[in-house]
């Protein structure tokens, strides 16, 4: 018997590839603030981690494209159509093709994660630039005030 207060478990996401469409909105929202309060060193670490993650994902996608593609499974591909189709299905899942969209392939998914990390990096870089501009303006204003004392 199910507890009526327990919400149902959602179905797994059918398209697990990250979608970077929200990052321009996040960037715009962050930059629209009058005053940014951030930890610049924390942002620099986030930028570095995003770049490293994207590089790793691109490397894994490249490796997946090379290592997951198979010429033969040794199950009679030369004689049996069903064996040829199975081999092709494995290849399609590895790099996209047939009924498998590129985004749903191993290579496509890894590249999509890399692009997501690059979107995050761009947002952090924009916020850091804005923060540094704000700090420069504040320092300049304080300098002018000090000159008048």
Image (tube, grey):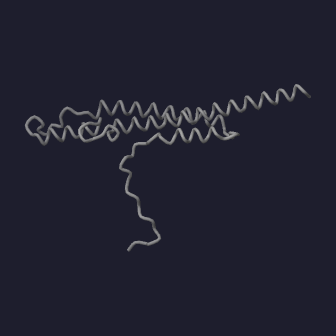
The residue located at (64%, 39%) in the rendering is 32
Q: In the depicted view, which residue is nearer to us: 34 or 88?
A: 34
Counting every numbered tag in the picture gives 0
Question: Which residue in the rendered view is the most extreme toward the top?
Answer: 147
Which quarter of the rendering shows the N terminus? Answer: bottom left
Q: Nearer the viewer, residue 46 or 29?
A: 29
- The residue closer to the viewer here, 102 or 59, is 102
Residue 99 locus on image (x, y percent):
25, 41
In the rendering, at what x and y percent does residue 72 appear? 18, 34
Q: Quadrant of residue 121?
A: top right
Image quarter of residue 41: top right
Residue found at x 46% / y 33%: 54
Pick whichever, 121 or 99, lies toward us. Answer: 99
- x, y percentage for residue 98? 23, 38
Q: Position of residue 80 (x, y in %)?
A: 9, 40
From the image, which quarter does the C terminus lie in? Answer: top right
Q: Is residue 137 left or right of residue 20?
A: right
Q: Is residue 66 above or below residue 90?
A: above
Residue at the extreme bottom: 1
Q: Quadrant of residue 125?
A: top right
């Amino acid at each position: 018997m199910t507890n009526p207060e327990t919400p149902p478990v959602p179905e797994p996401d059918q398209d697990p590839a990250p979608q970077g469409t929200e990052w321009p909105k996040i960037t715009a929202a962050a930059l629209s603030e009058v005053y940014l309060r951030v930890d610049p060193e924390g942002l620099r670490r986030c930028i570095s981690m995003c770049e490293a993650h994207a590089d790793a994902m691109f490397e894994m996608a490249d490796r997946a494209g090379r290592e997951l593609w198979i010429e033969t499974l040794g199950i009679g591909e030369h004689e049996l159509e069903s064996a040829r189709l199975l081999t092709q299905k494995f290849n399609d899942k590895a790099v996209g093709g047939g009924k498998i969209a590129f985004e749903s392939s191993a290579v496509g998914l890894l590249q999509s994660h890399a692009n997501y990390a690059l979107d995050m990096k761009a947002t952090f870089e924009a916020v850091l630039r804005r923060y540094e501009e704000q700090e420069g303006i504040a320092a300049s204003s304080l300098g002018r005030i000090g000159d008048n004392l």
